[in-house]
Image (cartoon, rainbow, N blue to C red):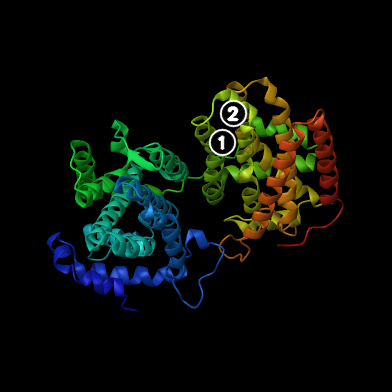
Amino acid sequence: MKDYKSLKVMDLFRVLFERFDIDYTSMRRILQLKLTMDTRRTPAMFNSQKPKNGKNQFLRSLWIYVLYGALGMTPFLFFPSQYMFSMGIAFTVLMFIAMTAMVSDFSAVLLDIRDKNILQPKPINNRTLNAAKIMHIVIYLSMLNCALIIVPLVVGSIRFGILFGVLFMVMAALLNCFIVVLTALIYLFILRFFSGEKLKDLINYVQIILTVAIMVGYQFMARSFELTQVAVTYQFAWWHVFLPPLWYSAFMEMVLHRVWSGKLLLLSILGILMPILSIVLYVKLMPTFERNLSKLLSDSSRQRGKIHIWANFWSKILCSNPQERVFFNFASLMMSRERSFKLKAYPQIGFSLVMPFVLLFNTSRSFSLKAIQENGSVMVLYFTMIMLPSIVHLLKFSDKYKSYWIYRVSPVADDRIFYSATLKACYVKLFLPLFIVVSSLFVAIFSWGILPSIGIMLLISVLLLWISYVMGSKERYPFSSSLEATQDTGTIRLLGSMLLLGILVLVHLGLSHLQYGLAFYAVLLIGVIFGGWKYSFGNRKVKNA
C-alpha cells in the first residue's frame, strides 16, 4: 500500500498518541488501509462521477474548495473595517463549507461500523480504533481547510503581516476541531435514545436540520454588524456567544488591533476553551459512543408502508386511472422511504421554506410594510420553487435502482403513467404542503389581495414541474438509475429551468400592473399546462434506463 504524505506528517506526533495509550503502529496501518479504500469513494459534491484509475476523488476536487475560499473569503480582506467583520465573514464561510462537508461526506465515516467485525476480534483496543476513525476525518478536513484558506492566507499575510497568517491558521484549526467534535456529540446524543431503523431515519433528519441551520446562521452573522455610512461597526449582543465565527474573529481583533475589552475577551476565551472542552468530553464519552453505534447494526424490518391520508386524497383527485393511482402511491412511498433521496431533497425543501422569509426580513429592514406591498416583494414566494428542477432530476435515481424491472413486468399497456404519476406525487407530497404553509403566512403578513398572485404562482409551479421533466432525461423510468454510476449531473438543465422561471416571474410582475393582466396570464398558463402535459404523456413507450 502507498505510504501517504499525511501519514508521514502524523508520524511527527507519534509520541503524543502513545501518551494516550494508543497503539500507534496499528492505528497507522488502519489509516493507511482506509486512505487506500477512499480511492473508491466519491465525495457528495461529485457524486455523479466515478473514481478513475484509483485516484482519490476528494483530492481531485480540492481545487473547487480553493475557488470557494478565494471568492468567499478573500474579498473581505480588502474591506476597510475591523477584523471582527472581515474575519467574522471569513470564518462563517469556512464553518459553512466545513460543516456541510462533515454532514454530507464524513458523517458516513464517523458512523461507519463495517470494520468492527473485522478489527474487533484482533488484538486492537477500542481507543486505537476510535483514534483511527477520528484521524481519518481530521486528515481530510485538514486538507479541505488548507484548500479553503490558502488564498486568503497568502493575501492576508501580504496585506497584514506574518502574525495574521499564523493566527488565521491556528483559529481555522480550532474551528475545524470544534466542528468535528460537535457533530460527533450531536450523533452521540441521538444514539443514546434511538435504535435500529428509526435511528437511521433520524440521522437523516439531523443532517437536514444541520444544513438548514447553517444557512440560517449566515443571517445571524449579518445581523451582528451595522453599516454606518461607509464603515461597518460591531455591536456586542448576548447571543453572539453562540456564534463560533465571532469567537475567532474577536481573538484576531484583540491581538492584531490591540483592542482590549471584556466582551471581546469573553468571545476569545470561548474560541479556545470550547474546542478543548468538547474534545475532552468526546474522549470521555467515546466508549459510550462506540457501544451505541452497534445499534446501527440492527436492521429491523419495516412495517408495511402505509399511504398517508394526504397522498391518498390527492391520488383520487389527480389520477382518474386506477393503474396511475397505484404508481402515484408507489412513488409517494419511495420518496418517504428512500434515505438517500431524502438526504439530497429535504435540505432543498428546507432552503425553499426559509429563503422567502429571509429575503422578506432583509427587505423589511430598509422599507416599511406598505412599501414592501407596493414594490412587489410578495414575489419572493417564487423562491419556494427553486427546489422543483433539482428534485425532478433526483426522481430518476434510487439506491434500489435494479428493482426497476417492476415497471417492465407490470400489466400496464401505456407506460406514460409511470412518470406522470411520479411527477404528481412529487408535487403533492413535497412542494404543495410547503407552498401552502409559506403562502398562508404571506397572506397573514400582507392581505387577501395577494391571492390572485398566489394563484398565478401555483400555475407557474405546475408549469415548472413539467418543464423540468421535459428538460430532463425523459427516456428513463423513475427511480431506475444509480446516482453513483450516472455521468448526468443535470447542471445545464437545472440552470435552464431556473432561467425560464426568472422570465416567467418578470412576465408576472409586468402583467400585475395591467387591468385583467393576471386573468389573461392565468388562462394562458392553464392552456400551456394542459397542452404540454397531453403532449408529453401521449401514447408512446418509454425507453429503458
Residue 32 in the figure: left or right of residue 473: left
What amino acid does circle 1 point to? Pro
Q: Quadrant of the C terminus?
A: bottom right
- Residue 62 location, quadrant: bottom left
Alpha carbon distance from label 1 to label 2: 13 Å
The residue at 35%/45% (across/down) is 187
Q: Which label number is shown at residue 412?
A: none
The residue at 37%/42% (across/down) is 231
Q: Is residue 140 visible?
A: no
- Residue 149 location, quadrant: bottom left
- Whole-percent x, y for residue 389 in the image: 65, 49
- Whole-percent x, y for residue 136 in the image: 32, 63
Disc 2 element: helix
Mark 1 or mark 2: name the one nearer the start of the chain.
1
What amino acid does circle 2 point to? Ile
Q: Quadrant of the N terminus?
A: bottom left
Residue 390 in the figure: left or right of residue 209: right
Residue reaching furthest to the front: 229
**Residue beneath disc 2:** 372
- Whole-percent x, y for residue 400 in the image: 59, 56
**Residue beneath disc 1:** 356
Front residue of this view, candidates 435 and 379? 379
Residue 306 in the figure: left or right of residue 540: left
Are circles 1 and 2 on residues that touch, CB within 8 Å?
no
